[in-house]
Structures are given as structure tokens and as C-alpha cells.
């Protein structure tokens, strides 16, 4: 029966992947923005990052993430950076710009949207490298980030593609359950899981992640691609949001553990029920073959 679970998760993972048309539309919107700021002296460069770049994006939930490196030193106030970003990025009659927490989101009909994250060059610390940037984290604190190192690490440790699927499943659960937890945080805990234990089964992998998140109460995890490799990644913007997220995480841990129990007992109907409670009614049926 193991292939029944694996096939269902693989099929669901593919079904929630953005279409080629969506990827093309978001890429075109990103390129239009890049062209519009190419001669603006306030912008040093733009760096793609996030789920679209890493191949873990979710249809209807993920945005195309782009780090916009601004000239000068980072200000104390994130709001000031967002105001500057809003002033720098032109919006035409077909687009809309919205400030969301730590970023500026540009949306256009037919595109998943582009999320622009303000950033500044990081320097002055021996640990900093050429690609080190100051970016805001989930708690709106300036932290050092190395987007290139992140992409390299993911490619090196995901030799069979299981990590990418695991991250996409976590993001699908997040968006469908509307859990206010940072996608970067979920990606970080998936990386930790992959480094600590080779993938056994996506169902077990998810269960172990949710159970640990529940028992650890969304404690910060180390960012292995930061200059220090120990910089904490925070799950939520505030303690209140972390407390709100605790319930759906506990429910996910419980539902996934019960799905495992039902699967071990050979009850595929109950297994499906628990998985659809996690991911939605479009989660595939489990094969009933012998």
C-alpha cells in the first residue's frame, strides 16, 4: 500500500502547482517592474527568491517574490522603506499595489502577483559575503539574508525532489487553511527535517513536522543560509498571530497522526477523510487496488 499514499501526494502536489501560463504571467509582470526601475538610481538591483524560483509555489496562494535592493543604509523603520518602495515602483492602470506587512504586492489580472521585499546591502561584519542583504523578517526586524545561498542549499539537498514536494505541500496547507505562518519559516523547518532525516514518506514527514511545530510552539529555527548559519527565523509577525496559528498546527498534527493510524489499519476511507480535512476535498482518492 505505500505507493497509494505516495501516488496521491504526488498527484496532489502537481495539481496545486501554478500553471505554465500563471508562471509566465507573473514572470512578465516581474520583468515589467524591473524594466521600469532599471534607470532609477534609488534601486541597485532586483533578486528573485521564494517559492516561484524554488519550484514550490502553490496555485492561488503563492506570489512571485522579488527582493528589491535599495541604495543607502537600512533605516530603523520598515515603514519608511515601504514608502520608498511604493514611490519607486510605478503602477499602471491595469495593476494595483498593496502594502502587506513587510512587502509591497503588485497584482494584475491574469497574474498571481509579485511581492516586492525591500532590502539593503549588508556590510561591516566578517561573516557577511557579497550576496548578504538586510531584509525584514516575519517579525518586521532587519535580518541578514543570502538568497543565492538559499537556492544553492535547496538544490544540493533535494536530490530526488522530495524536499520540494514537501515544501509545496506545507505551503498548500498554509494557504488553504489560512495559517498566518511565514512561508520562509515553513521552508526552513522542511530543510531542517530533510537534513536530520532522509524522507521516509511524505505523510510521515508532514506529521513529524507538524508534531514538532506543535510541541515547540513555533519556536524560531536556525537559518542555515544566513551569514552566521544560526540567525533565527521567526514564524509570525506577533505573539498574537503565533497563538492563533497554534490551533491549526495542533489540528494538523492530530489529523496527520490519525491518517497514519487509519492507513496502518488499512482503512483508506478514514485516511482520505483526514487528508482532505488537511488539504481540501480535491485531495485525490487513494487507490483501492490490492
Image (cartoon, rainbow, N blue to C red):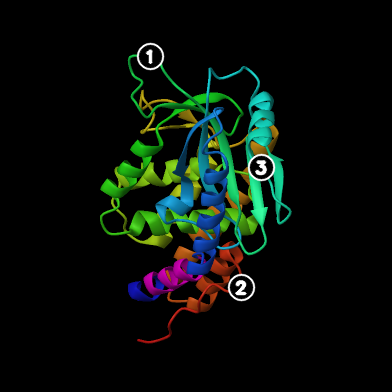
Q: Nearer the viewer, mark 1 or mark 3?
A: 3
Name the disc covering residue 125, or none: 1
Spatial separation of the CA atoms under disc 1 and disc 3 = 34 Å
Residue 34 point in image, percent of width and height: 52, 44
Quadrant assignment, res 105: top right
Q: Main secondary structure of the magenta part?
A: helix
Query: Dot 2: within a 10 Å radius of its alpha carbon, few (fewer than 14), some, or many (20 or more) residues?
Result: few
**Camera-nearest residue between 288 and 55:** 55
Quadrant assignment, res 237: top right
Lateral position of residue 97 relative to residue 166, left or right: right
**Camera-nearest residue between 100 and 216:** 100
Residue 198 point in image, percent of width and height: 28, 51
Q: Nearer the viewer, mark 2 or mark 1?
A: 1
- Is 3 situated above or below 67? below
> Which circle's residue, 3 or 2, is located before the other in the chain?
3
Please tell me whether residue 267 belongs to the stretch shown in magenta.
no
**Camera-nearest residue between 270 and 16:** 16
Residue 115 point in image, percent of width and height: 59, 45
Q: Is residue 107 visible to us here? A: yes
Residue picked out by circle 3: 90
For the N terminus, the image quarter is bottom left
Q: Disc 2 on helix, strand or loop?
A: loop
Residue at position x 41%, y 47% in the image: 190
Q: Disc 3 on helix, strand or loop?
A: loop
Q: Disc 1 on helix, strand or loop?
A: loop
Q: Nearer the viewer, mark 3 or mark 2?
A: 3
**Magenta region:** 6-16
Query: Dot 1: within a 10 Å radius of its alpha carbon, few (fewer than 14), some, or many (20 or more) residues?
Result: few
Q: Is residue 204 visible to us here? A: no
Name the disc covering residue 281, or none: 2
Amino acid at each position: 500500500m505505500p505507493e497509494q499514499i505516495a501516488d496521491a501526494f504526488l498527484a496532489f502536489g502537481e495539481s496545486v502547482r501554478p500553471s505554465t501560463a500563471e508562471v509566465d504571467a507573473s514572470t512578465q509582470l516581474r520583468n515589467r517592474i524591473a524594466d521600469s526601475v532599471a534607470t532609477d538610481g534609488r534601486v541597485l538591483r532586483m533578486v528573485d527568491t521564494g517559492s516561484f524560483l524554488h519550484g514550490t509555489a502553490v496555485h492561488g496562494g503563492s506570489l512571485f517574490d522579488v527582493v528589491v535592493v535599495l541604495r543607502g543604509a537600512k533605516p530603523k523603520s520598515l515603514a519608511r522603506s515601504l514608502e520608498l518602495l511604493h514611490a519607486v515602483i510605478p503602477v499602471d492602470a491595469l495593476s494595483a499595489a498593496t502594502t502587506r506587512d513587510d512587502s509591497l504586492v503588485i497584482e494584475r489580472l491574469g497574474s498571481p502577483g509579485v511581492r516586492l521585499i525591500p532590502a539593503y546591502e549588508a556590510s561591516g561584519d566578517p561573516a557577511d559575503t557579497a550576496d548578504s542583504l538586510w531584509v525584514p523578517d516575519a517579525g518586521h526586524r532587519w535580518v541578514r539574508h543570502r538568497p543565492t545561498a538559499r537556492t544553492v542549499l535547496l538544490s544540493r539537498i533535494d536530490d530526488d525532489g522530495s524536499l520540494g514536494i514537501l515544501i509545496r505541500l506545507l505551503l498548500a496547507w498554509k494557504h488553504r487553511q489560512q495559517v498566518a505562518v511565514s512561508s520562509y519559516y515553513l521552508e526552513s523547518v522542511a530543510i531542517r527535517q530533510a537534513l536530520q532525516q532522509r524522507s521516509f514518506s511524505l505523510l510521515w514527514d508532514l506529521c513529524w513536522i507538524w508534531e514538532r511545530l506543535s510541541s515547540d510552539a513555533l519556536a524560531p529555527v536556525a537559518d542555515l543560509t544566513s551569514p552566521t548559519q544560526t540567525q533565527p527565523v521567526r514564524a509570525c509577525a506577533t505573539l498574537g498571530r503565533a497563538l492563533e496559528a497554534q490551533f491549526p498546527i495542533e489540528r494538523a498534527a492530530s489529523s496527520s497522526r490519525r491518517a497514519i493510524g487509519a492507513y496502518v489499519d488499512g482503512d483508506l476511507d478514514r485516511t482520505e477523510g483526514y487528508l482532505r480535512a488537511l488539504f481540501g476535498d480535491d485531495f485525490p482518492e487513494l487507490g483501492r487496488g490490492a
